[in-house]
Image (cartoon, rainbow, N blue to C red):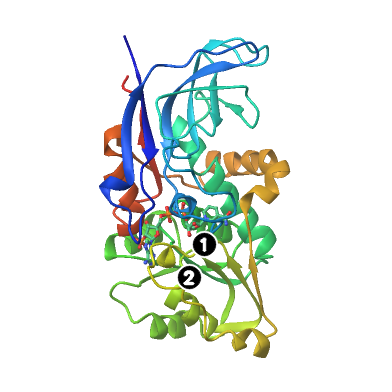
Amino acid sequence: MKENKQLLLRKRPLGLPKQDTWKLVKTEIPKPNDGEFLVECEFVSLDPAMRGWINAGRSSYIPPVELNDVMRAGGVGKIIESNHENFKVGEYVYGQTGIQQYIVTDGNGWHKVDPTLAPLPMYLGTLGMPGMTAYFGILEVGELKEGDAVLVSGAAGAVGSVVGQIAKIKNCKVIGIAGGADKCKYIVDELGFDGAIDYKSDNVASKLKEYFPKGIDVYFDNVGGDILDLALSRLAMHARIVICGAISQYNNTTPIKGPSNYLSLLVNRGTMRGMVVFDYAKDYQKAAIQMGQWMMQGKLKSKEDVYEGIENFHETFLRLFSGDKKGKLVLKVSEN
Ligand SMILES: NC(=O)c1ccc[n+]([C@@H]2O[C@H](COP(=O)([O-])OP(=O)(O)OC[C@H]3O[C@@H](n4cnc5c(N)ncnc54)[C@H](OP(=O)(O)O)[C@@H]3O)[C@@H](O)[C@H]2O)c1
């Protein structure tokens, strides 16, 4: 008899999560009631925001995961039993699966995905939440204009790699910041960025000076901390900074380091604006169609880095913070 493996939040971590932050349990596979369906979860999305969700208090944009609850996560899977008139057995869906192998839902907040149009993990990356973040973040919050000089951090990751490629499609000059020579080569040679800065070995300040002689028009910030401060010191007039994330600060045991160079916004009449992707939900479909077209035209590449086994959740999750992965980090939890 099959069982449902579920990953629970056992303890709130201080700093980087440890193996004992989590507890893997085996439970019975739930049964759908009227108006519900049972999903076999295949792939789950591992996202930096999950680190915020396991802090006590409202340090994220949604309430924290409670202790002993299944860890929250988006995922894709197949409907294997259904008592719901709009969701049929055999269809594939995206929703808040959590880190587990089976889930029963009433379908509220879920939508169908088509594995014949794109591989399932891509619905967690470029055609999913990170892709939408990139699209609305750079085009709407960043108010991208043709010819802008654009800087993006976390540039080889799920959001950053798409931000940079969209800016290239819009005829901008794009420089990415990433960790390590391999990722820097990847964003230039494979994704078409105009240049890369390896924040682990380059002098970021002097590279910014070299790449942006007239200043940065748009900085898309995924990392916060010192890199945000250095970008602030190199702004062009009327520059826009998109505050998308601050991964360098998520595991801090001391208060978050804020920017000290913020008066550069005053001098350059710049703006710095935060965004949460869910605010754009009503336009996701439009964006996904556009991204799909760019992919078919060979203008946008999508990369998913897929690891296997719910037992390997912890080591895989830590790759977000070590940077030991490329593109969208995904975990396969089904055992088929
Ligand atoms: N606002 C929103 O609605 C929204 C939605 C989605 C994501 N986000 C945010 O967007 C950012 C990127 O998310 P993602 O899903 O695309 O993740 P990702 O970039 O695919 O993965 C995280 C990457 O961050 C880099 N990193 C880790 N620690 C770092 C540090 N101390 N300094 C600099 N870089 C570091 C690593 O790349 P390197 O090897 O290059 O270091 C790692 O691969 C995150 O901050 C996330 O919270 C925000």
Q: Which amino acid, mark 2?
A: Gly
Q: Position of residue 112 (x, y in %)?
A: 59, 25
Q: Is residue 168 at all visible to an observer of this figure?
A: yes
- Distance of label 1 from label 2 (alpha carbons): 7 Å
Asked if disc 2 is less than 8 Å from ligand 1, the answer is yes
Residue closest to the eye, 139 or 11:
11
As drawn, is 144 to the left or to the right of 194? right
Q: Position of residue 191 (x, y in %)?
A: 43, 55
The picture quadrant where one finds residue 40 is top left
Look at mark 1 in the image and give the residue it sits on: 245
Q: Residue furthest right?
A: 282
Look at mark 2 in the image and give the residue it sits on: 224
Q: Which amino acid, mark 1?
A: Gly
> Compared to 12, does 221 lie above or below?
below
Q: Residue visible at 39% across and 67% down?
A: 252
Quadrant location of the C terminus in the rendered image: top left
**Element assignment for label 2:** loop
Sequence-wise, the earlier of marks 1 and 2 is 2
Q: Residue visible at 67% across and 80% down?
A: 270
Q: Position of residue 174 (x, y in %)?
A: 51, 67
Q: Position of residue 184 (x, y in %)?
A: 34, 64
